Amino acid sequence: MSTGQVRLERLYLKDASFESPRSPDVFGETWNPEMQLEINTRTSAQQNNRFEVVLTVTLRAKSETGKTAFIIEVQQAGLFLIEGVDDPVRQRVLATVCPNTLFPYVRETVDSLAVRGGFPAIQLAPVNFDAAYSEALTKQQAPPADEVTH
C-alpha cells in the first residue's frame, strides 16, 4: 500500500499592498485601532498533480473616529504537489494543510508592511483552518434554513 504525499515546491508572494491614506496626520492620534481581518483561500489545479494555493489576507485598521489608518493586503502563494490521495483527502489538504503552511509567511509580511508604514507591529493570531473547513462542510451538508416547501 502506497501513501500519498504533499510537498511544497515553490513559495512566492503573489501580491502585496499597503495604503495609509491619512499619513502623516494619523501618527498624531491615539493608537487604539479597530482591526478588521478577512482571510480567503483560492486554489487552482496546475499540471502533473500540482495545485496553486493563494492565501489572501486583508487587514483594515480604523481609528477611534472610524477613519482608515491603513489597509494591508497580502496574497501569499504556494505551488503544492499532491499525489496518491483520493479527492476528499485532496480537498481537505488544499483547504487546511496548504493554508496552514502559507499563513506564517503572510503573518510576517503583514507585520513587516505595518512597521515599514510607521505603525506598531501587528501579530496576527493563528487561524484554525481545520475548524473552518469542518464548519464549511457542515454548512454544505445542512439543508437551507429558509427552504420552503409547497
Image: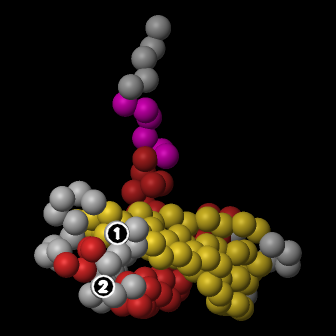
Q: Three-letter amino acid code at disc 2?
A: Phe
Region of the chain picked out in magenta, as a range: 140-145
Quadrant where the N terminus is found in the figure: bottom right
Does residue 129 appear to the left or right of 78 in the view shown?
left
The local secondary structure at tag 2 comes to loop
* 19 over 113 or under it: above or below: above
Q: How is the image coloured?
A: secondary structure
Mark 1 neighbour density, 10 Å: few (under 14) some (14–19) many (20 or more): few
Q: Three-letter amino acid code at disc 1?
A: Arg
The local secondary structure at tag 1 comes to loop
Residue assigned mark 2? 119
110 and 12: which one is in front?
A: 110
Q: Position of residue 94 (x, y in %)?
A: 60, 72
133 and 79: which one is in front?
A: 79
* 86 over 150 or under it: above or below: below
Q: Position of residue 47 (x, y in %)?
A: 85, 75
Q: Position of residue 32 (x, y in %)?
A: 16, 73
Question: Is 127 included in the stretch rendered in magenta?
Answer: no
Q: Which residue in the rendered view is the most extreme toward the top?
A: 150
Q: Residue at x 43, y 32 (%)?
A: 144
Residue assigned mark 1? 22
Q: Residue at x 72, y 66 (%)?
A: 44
Kindly indicate the quadrant of the structure image that contains residue 58: bottom left
